[in-house]
Image (cartoon, rainbow, N blue to C red):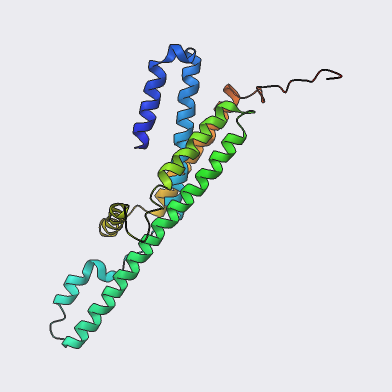
């Protein structure tokens, strides 16, 4: 969804280049979209790198083999072992749901901060600030959209089930290492810093664009 939004915005800017004010204005619009998308990706990558999902219990993937190899044990021991495994799986699913709610809250909260900061700086740094505000808006819309469906079922139950399935699939197939996730975050963060510096030097080096009109003496 993010890539589709960015592609539509870039194509619209290119197609309506004449109405936007020429190639420099198109470049500025493309830059703002790229900056907003990059900031959103930086926050998402940071959440993945530093807020790790819970570890799956050992019995989640080996439950069938352990139950078949315990034919010589008594039925009471089998029931006790099965009950413990079920409790562990339930606890894991709850931790997985809590992890999803936490990551959505962090993305939405950081997005709000970026959005407010971008809007506050619009008069002094209009190009960079508008791109940052766009990134914050993307985080609020995409990062916090599933937070309302959360725990009680209802309209977002499909998203909740999909999140649980994704967590189980990640436990079965294996997730990327934390070092690689941090490296990915570092690459995106470096790109975001480079984009910010480029925008400040290229378009916003003059500071405030609009001057406050002076009042005439005796007015």
Residue 166 image position (x, y, % from top left): 29, 54
> Between 152 and 15, which is closer to the camera in this rendering?
152
Residue 135 image position (x, y, % from top left): 48, 37
> Between 117 and 51, which is closer to the camera in this rendering?
117
Residue 75 image position (x, y, % from top left): 16, 86
Report how many numbered discs are placed on residues in the image. 0
Q: Is residue 191 visible?
A: no
Q: Residue furthest front?
A: 219
Q: Can residue 182 be seen in this view?
A: yes
Which residue corresponds to the image point at 46% horizontal and 36% vertical from the top-left? 38
Of the 4 image quadrants, the one containing the N terminus is top left
From the viewer's perspective, is 7 left or right of 35? left
Which residue corresponds to the image point at 54% horizontal and 41% vertical from the top-left? 114
Q: Is residue 115 above or below residue 200?
A: below
Residue 176 image position (x, y, % from top left): 35, 52
Q: In this view, does 168 lie above or below 125?
A: below
Of the 4 image quadrants, the one containing the C terminus is top right
From the viewer's perspective, is 27 left or right of 169? right
Tell me where residue 213 sits by quadrant. top right
> Between 34 and 156, which is closer to the camera in this rendering?
156
Q: Which residue lies furthest to the right in this view?
A: 218
From the viewer's perspective, is 71 left or right of 59? left
Q: In this view, does 37 lie above or below 169?
A: above
């Amino acid at each position: 969804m993010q890539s589709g939004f960015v592609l539509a915005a870039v194509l619209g800017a290119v197609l309506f280049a004449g109405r936007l004010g020429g190639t420099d204005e198109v470049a500025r619009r493309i830059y703002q979209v790229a900056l907003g998308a990059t900031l959103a990706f930086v926050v998402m990558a940071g959440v993945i790198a530093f807020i790790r999902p819970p570890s799956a219990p050992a019995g989640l993937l080996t439950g069938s083999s352990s139950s078949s190899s315990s034919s010589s044990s008594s039925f009471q021991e089998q029931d006790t072992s099965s009950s413990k495994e079920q409790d562990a799986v339930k606890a894991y699913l709850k931790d997985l749901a809590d992890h999803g709610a936490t990551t959505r809250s962090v993305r939405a909260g950081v997005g709000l901060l970026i959005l407010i900061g971008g809007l506050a700086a619009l008069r002094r740094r209009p190009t960079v600030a508008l791109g940052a505000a766009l990134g914050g808006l993307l985080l609020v819309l995409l990062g916090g959209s599933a937070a309302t469906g959360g725990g009680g079922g209802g309209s977002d139950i499909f998203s909740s089930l999909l999140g649980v399935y994704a967590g189980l699939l990640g436990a079965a197939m294996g997730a990327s290492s934390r070092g690689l996730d941090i490296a990915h975050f570092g690459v995106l963060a470096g790109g975001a810093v480079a984009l910010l510096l480029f925008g400040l030097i290229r378009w916003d080096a003059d500071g405030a664009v609009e001057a406050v009109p002076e009042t005439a003496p005796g007015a």
